[in-house]
Image (cartoon, coloured by chain):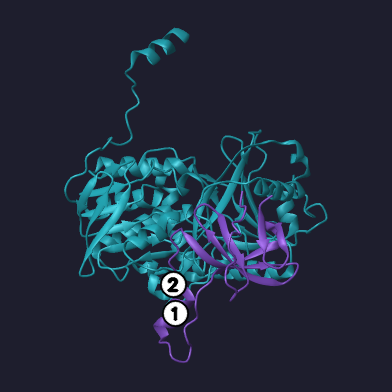
Amino acid sequence: MAYQLLKYALGGEYKEPRFFRDCQTPKKSYDAVIIGGGGHGLAAAYYLAKDHGITNVAVLEKGYIGGGNTGRNTTIVRSNYLTPDGVNFYDASVKLFEGLSTELDINLFYSNRGHFTLAHSESAMRTMRWRAEVNKHVGVKSRVVGTDEIAKACPQMDLSCSGKSPIQGALYHEPGSIARHDAVAWGYARGADSMGVEIFQNTEVQGIDIKDGQVQGVQTSRGYISTGKVLSAVAGFTPRICKMVDLKTPIVIHPLQACVSEPMKPWLDTILVSGSLHVYVSQSSRGELVMGSSLDPYEFHSTRSTFDFVEGLTSHIVDMFPFLSNVKIVRQWAGMADITPDFAPIMGMTPIKGFYLDAGWGTWGFKATPISGKTMAHTLANDKPHDLIHSFRLSRFEEYELTGEKGAASVGH
Amino acid sequence: MKLLNCPVNGVRPLSEFIFGGECREMPNPETSTDLEWASYVHYRDNAPGIKKEWWYHSPSGTWFIAERNTLSDEVLSTYLHGKAPAKNTKEQSA
């Protein structure tokens, strides 16, 4: 066995094929250019090719695919939002996620866990009841549960949270799941590539050429590409891309940090979120506890992580699970979250013809990967926003028609 | 511990401060159009760079201005609103 392994390693011929071609030189022009090779951009490329037959598409990624917020989130998929439009949108995403491993022929480790949003106060319980009723109305499985049901689902938890903030109840969301986030990017990349989409890594967009209010092309570190349609799907880099086209948005960038513990035997079946303790936690298929927190408190365009964050987060985790006090944290990191005032995304058309935005994904982007790709592909192909994303249009701000989802954000309110 | 220089109370730990967002001039609400007002309320050029921001020193209730590089998190100066920025007050930020 050791000999065979050595032979395989030195043989230089690895049987595992590449997921997508190693594109180096872009063509002179494409029907559409997608900036950002994260889950959202690659999903949009995939559905442009699959649903609309538009395959002459380039995806430009400054770093490597899935290396931005796609690989930095805490992998939770859920649809227990607050506005009917939000619930409908995220529910469509959950349904796509459920069949995605088969569709993309890659194991996404999609694991349905059930999702508890813990309430530690009467006002939090009120929000839970509100969300449960909106969810039920739209046909999404969410309900308010008491402490007995929480204790049954997670007997390891101290329901008094070390006596500091006793749990009164929770919003239970049955479809809540976790998935392997980077595999989502790889799966969409392979699918798009196999239909002809070209993916360029290490390719930076340096400028966007606009004439008479219409996109003409994109200046990149690999030369100029002419195109009439550009989709920006760059999360925390959105303000920098928007500056290239002189477009102002309400997006503010805050770092969002997360960490994982050392791996342990499986003990935590469910996904737990506490808005009051600023914590969300689940156990990955590798046995690590994946833990996230609230946003860093001020604008900052960086992916640095801090000791303050680990100290604050773990103290709350230990309040919930005192027996974890000796467990080690093995990795911590940050992503740049593009936060909007109403905690809903900004999707669709812009005042610039041919410039489309898929942005404002703040702390809620991973779960929307399939549906954002599908609806943005529809929007690009038809030059008309998809019905599901009407409430997320950029112009809602000047029309004072905000889509208030703050009450459904995991933490930080 | 990250520090910030409050123009009234001197150098204090960052945990004593609250971020108040970018400092922007308010258009005259009587004369501005709906779109101008909406732009003031919502739209920002939030590309990274040196920004003038509102900060609040919570224990003393002091609102003041900080000029900060939002890419490097370097604070260049802090001063009370309307007071000319003092020279050579380059702040520590690491």
Q: Depth check: B50 or A145 in front? A: B50
User: Toward the viewer: B15 or A314?
Assistant: B15
Q: Residue at x 62, y 61 (%)?
A: A412
Q: Is residue B36 above or below residue A158?
A: below
Using the numbered discs, state the Cα–Cα distance from disc 2 to disc 1 in whole angstroms: 7 Å
Q: Residue furthest bottom?
A: B30
A159 horizontally vs B47: left or right: right
Q: Colour of chain A?
A: cyan
The residue type indicated by label 2 comes to Tyr
In the shown orientation, is residue A92 left or right of residue A120?
A: left
**Image quarter of the C terminus of chain A:** bottom right
Identify the residue position indicated by label 2 in the image.
Answer: B43
Residue with the most extreme top position: A3
The residue at which mark 1 appears reads as B38
Find residue A307 and report its horizontal and vertical position in percent.
66, 45
* Residue at point 70%, 50% (across, down): A312
Tell whether label 1 touches label 2 (CB within 8 Å).
yes
Residue A177, percent from left and from top: 54, 49
Q: Give the colour of chain B.
A: purple
Q: Which amino acid does the dot numbered 1 rest on?
A: Ala
* Numbered label attached to residue A29: none
Element under disc 2: loop
Q: Is A80 or A411 nearer to us in this picture? A: A411
Say which chain tag 2 marks. B
